[in-house]
Image (tube, rainbow, N blue to C red):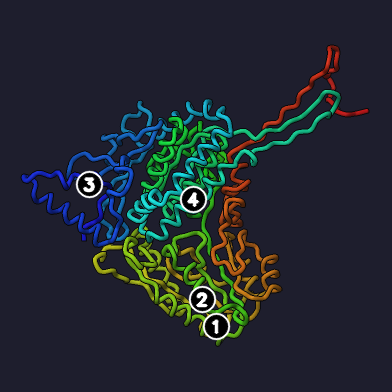
């Protein structure tokens, strides 16, 4: 099956092709029929005609444009050799090409990244002096636009097309990002400083939270809308300007979100979007005019970004990997609802989320744990794997062939090292999408024969590796203390959950567990943006969290003003010795 093409302009090209290109018309007709086969929404129902796509001719796949200084701009033709193919994860056919924005053959000309940073730098004085209530009001209008179902469906369409997740999951991706935009509508109250008067006669001190300048974000593939919306709305609401680098694997959602924001009257240069991969990231990390960088992604990339960014004098927040544990008190947990919750949290989004439950620790009798594991397998078998546009699909493809190959290799290695694979999703094929990156739900039991000893190190790769795929690892231990001990030895600290009807067990777990986000009968405890995203340990670099009050603090710095106003002349304004205030 041919890959689904992008944009109403593709369909318009098909409709206007002349008789002399009948073969091309036939090909485009098949493309249109593929939209219907995948039950994708009608492209004509969307507001925008994919203005971020640039066509060089009628046959080539389009290139993705950057958004700089309030406008989409065509990629530089001389840089085509550095373009990155964007593949449909359901088929591995090329959808488009993504430019490397920090790559230019003419070294005397600024790169797209340089021009984006310069646009943000020029916009900063005017934007930072814009009243905070005006900035908040723009966020309120933005939230109103994103609340419209047709807008969220349009954004979700591009997420499903490029990233592969189901339409329902893509809609949730947009919604959770929208909630951060809503939080940005009240940012003024989080920016309040402190003051104290009469530190000495006529002497007062006031502190203000002020913006940093040009900030940048490096977003991941797994949440193309939500993570972008974790970044730039709070940044610009607090008075900064922004350069966003979306994932090269699914950039269209970020470009569409930016287009909707600019339609509301955001001044040119306040938010810019540049595409690319490591070359562009390195340019961001070393650019002298960028003051702060936000990143979400893998540990390897996050540690590199935090290290290089910090060495170049930038404030950096980096949310990274995870291996989230769910503890189940088998003797009292609500069995049916717990099984369903764990399966959803483990296999939803094809396991490609940093808050997925990838390990379940069953507390109690070993024989009973085998029964629970069998029920997890039975529930997982009910999930439908396929193209994200198809109604009823629960698990879409992985993002790339490399990701699929890696997951399958880890599964194979875990079996070789003694694990029991109770449900094997390797080699999964979907009719009509045989070239896709599909891996069915997989359940690996490390406790089939005996309880796990919390005093011994678990070395099986199904446990030690962040697989980032629909793979659930099962452990069994005798006691809650054992479960807490094992979970706390895990290097990561993004999230965890306990399933129980015992208040005493829940409270003990809540206070003794080390992970930064704890769910009690809540499988994925991602806080709403009244709070902050508080992963810890190896799941984060930097000490200021995303969104909430911490997010505001990340994008601002304190300025303290001490003033001496004497009524009349002749007051003491200080001398050569150290000033000591308020001394009798």
Image check: 171 left or right of 105? right
Mark 4 vs 2: CB contact within 8 A: no
Q: Nearer the viewer, mark 1 or mark 2?
A: 2
Q: Quadrant of residue 194?
A: top right
Q: Nearer the viewer, residue 245 or 455?
A: 245
Q: Which mark is residue 10?
A: 3
User: Which residue is denoted by mark 1 in the rendering?
Assistant: 369
Name the image quarter holding the N terminus: bottom left
Residue nearest the observer in this picture, 380 or 249: 380
**Cα distance between the residues tagged 4 and 2:** 28 Å
Q: Which residue of the protein is positioned furthest toward the bottom in this rendering? A: 367
Which residue is at 56% across, 70% downward? 326
CA separation in Å, label 4 and label 1: 37 Å
Q: Residue 333, percent across and down?
A: 60, 78
Q: Mark 2 and mark 3: span between their CA atoms?
A: 44 Å
Task: Identify the element where label 1 is drawn.
Answer: helix
Judged from the image, the secondary structure of the residue bearing numbered disc 2 is helix
Sequence-wise, which precedes: disc 1 or disc 2?
Answer: 2
The residue at which mark 4 appears reads as: 177
- Closer to the chain start, of discs 3 and 4, is 3
At x 59%, y 60%, the residue is 493
Q: Which residue is mark 2?
A: 339
Task: Return the x and y of residue 309 as percentages of the image width and height.
Answer: 53, 41
Which of the marked residues, 4 or 2, is nearer the chain's N terminus? 4
Rendered position, 573 above or below 251: above
């Amino acid at each position: 099956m041919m890959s689904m093409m992008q944009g109403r302009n593709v369909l318009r090209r098909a409709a206007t092709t002349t008789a002399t290109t009948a073969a091309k018309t036939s090909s485009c007709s098949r493309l249109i029929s593929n939209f219907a086969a995948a039950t994708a929404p009608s492209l004509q129902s969307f507001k925008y005609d994919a203005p971020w796509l640039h066509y060089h001719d009628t046959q080539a796949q389009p290139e993705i444009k950057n958004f700089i200084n309030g406008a989409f701009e065509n990629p530089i033709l001389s840089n085509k050799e550095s373009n990155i193919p964007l593949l449909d994860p359901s088929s591995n056919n090329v959808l488009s090409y993504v430019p490397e924005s920090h790559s230019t053959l003419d070294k005397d000309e600024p790169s797209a990244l340089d021009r984006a940073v310069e646009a943000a730098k020029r916009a900063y004085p005017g934007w930072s002096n814009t009243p905070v209530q005006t900035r908040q009001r723009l966020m309120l209008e933005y939230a109103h636009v994103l609340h419209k179902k047709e807008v969220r469906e349009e954004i979700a369409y591009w997420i499903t097309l490029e990233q592969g997740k189901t339409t329902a999951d893509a809609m949730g991706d947009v919604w959770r990002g929208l909630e951060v935009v809503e939080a940005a509508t009240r940012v003024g109250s989080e920016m309040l400083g402190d003051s104290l008067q009469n530190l000495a006669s006529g002497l007062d001190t006031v502190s203000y939270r002020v913006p940093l300048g040009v900030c940048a974000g490096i977003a991941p593939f797994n949440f193309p809308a939500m993570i972008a919306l974790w970044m730039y709305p709070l940044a610009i609401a607090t008075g900064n300007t922004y350069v966003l680098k979306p994932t090269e694997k699914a950039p269209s959602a970020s470009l569409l979100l930016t287009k909707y924001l600019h339609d509301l009257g955001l001044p040119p240069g306040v938010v810019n979007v540049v595409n690319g991969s490591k070359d562009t990231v390195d340019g961001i990390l070393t650019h002298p005019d960028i003051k702060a960088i936000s990143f979400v992604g893998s540990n390897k990339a996050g540690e590199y970004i935090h290290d290089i960014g910090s060495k170049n004098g930038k404030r950096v927040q980096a949310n990274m990997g995870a291996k989230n544990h769910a503890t189940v008190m088998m003797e009292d947990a609500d069995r049916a609802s717990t099984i369903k919750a764990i399966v959803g949290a483990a296999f939803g989004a094809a396991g490609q989320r940093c808050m997925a439950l990838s390990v379940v620790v069953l507390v109690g009798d070993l024989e009973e744990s085998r029964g629970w594991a069998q029920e997890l397998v039975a529930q997982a078998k009910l999930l439908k794997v396929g193209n994200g546009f198809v109604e009823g699909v629960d698990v879409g493809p992985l993002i790339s062939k490399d990701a699929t190959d890696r997951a399958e290799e880890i599964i194979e290695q875990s079996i070789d090292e003694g694990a029991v694979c109770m449900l094997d999703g390797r080699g999964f094929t979907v009719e009509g999408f045989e070239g896709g990156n599909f891996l069915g739900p997989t359940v690996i039991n490390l406790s089939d024969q005996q309880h796990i000893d919390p005093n011994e190190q678990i070395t099986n790769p199904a446990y030690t590796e962040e697989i980032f795929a629909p793979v659930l690892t099962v452990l069994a231990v005798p006691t809650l203390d054992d479960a807490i001990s094992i979970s706390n030895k895990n290097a990561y600290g993004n999230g965890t959950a306990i399933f129980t009807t015992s208040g005493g067990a829940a409270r003990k777990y809540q206070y003794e567990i080390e992970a930064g986000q704890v769910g009690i009968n809540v499988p994925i405890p991602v806080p709403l943006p009244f709070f902050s995203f508080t992963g810890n340990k190896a799941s984060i670099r930097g000490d200021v969290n995303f969104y909430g009050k911490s997010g505001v603090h990340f994008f601002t710095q304190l300025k303290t003003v001490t003033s001496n106003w004497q009524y009349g002349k002749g007051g003491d304004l200080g001398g050569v010795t150290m000033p000591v205030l308020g001394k009798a």
